[in-house]
Amino acid sequence: MQVLEIYDPAMCCSTGVCGPDVDPALVSFAADLKWLETRGVAVLRYNLGQDAGVFAGNPSVVKELAAGLDRLPIIALDGRIVSVGVYPSRIQLAQTLGIDAGSAVDGAVAAPACVAGSGCC
């Protein structure tokens, strides 16, 4: 099983899909990650504000961050950094993971819903 790790900048919640002014790119990216999970990809997502120890424990991520916080998000596939500074599109993710890019446009997956009382809504 492939493992995709996302090292996000500090956000109010684990996906950034919260609050009154949600970035549409984060909504699409969250849906794209759910789509990848339905295709057998393990997705691990870390938020700098909540998971700083995970960032510090990865020498490759520390090296990227030495160049500045604008390197976030950092995306790693099976421990190897494959993207920095941008949230890739569903098609770019499919290509990176070797998933049929044609299936990348099949049926959109809804973005995760806010959970009442979680502090994200």
Image (cartoon, rainbow, N blue to C red):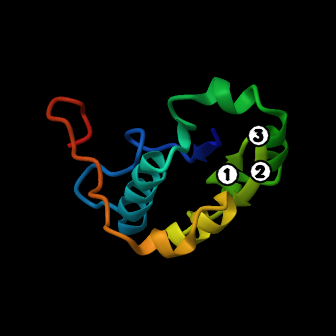
Q: Is residue 60 above or below residue 50?
A: below
Instruction: Tell me how far mark 3 sits from mark 1, CA to CA.
Output: 11 Å
Amino acid type at circle 1 is: Ile
Res. 74 mark: 1
Res. 60 mark: none
Q: Residue at point 42% right, 39% down?
A: 14
Q: Which residue is mark 3?
A: 79
Question: In the rendered view, does 38 fall on the left or right side of 84?
Answer: left
Instruction: Tell me how far mark 3 sits from mark 2, CA to CA.
Output: 7 Å
Res. 81 mark: 2
Q: Residue at point 73% right, 41% down?
A: 78
Circle 3/circle 1 CB separation < 8 Å: no
Give the secondary structure at mark 3. loop
Give the secondary structure at mark 2. strand
**Horizontal and vertical percent for residue 103?**
47, 69
Q: Residue at point 24% right, 33% down?
A: 119
Instruction: Report the quarter where the N terminus lies.
Output: top right
Instruction: Tell me how far mark 2 sits from mark 1, CA to CA.
Output: 7 Å
Q: Is residue 116 above or below residue 9?
A: above
Q: Is residue 42 above or below residue 83?
A: above
Quarter of image, res 21: bottom left
Amino acid type at circle 2 is: Ile
**Horizontal and vertical percent for residue 12?**
38, 41
Please state the total of marks drawn on the protein image: 3
Q: Residue furthest left?
A: 116
Question: In the rendered view, does 22 fall on the left or right side of 87?
Answer: left
Circle 2/circle 1 CB separation < 8 Å: yes
Amino acid type at circle 3 is: Gly
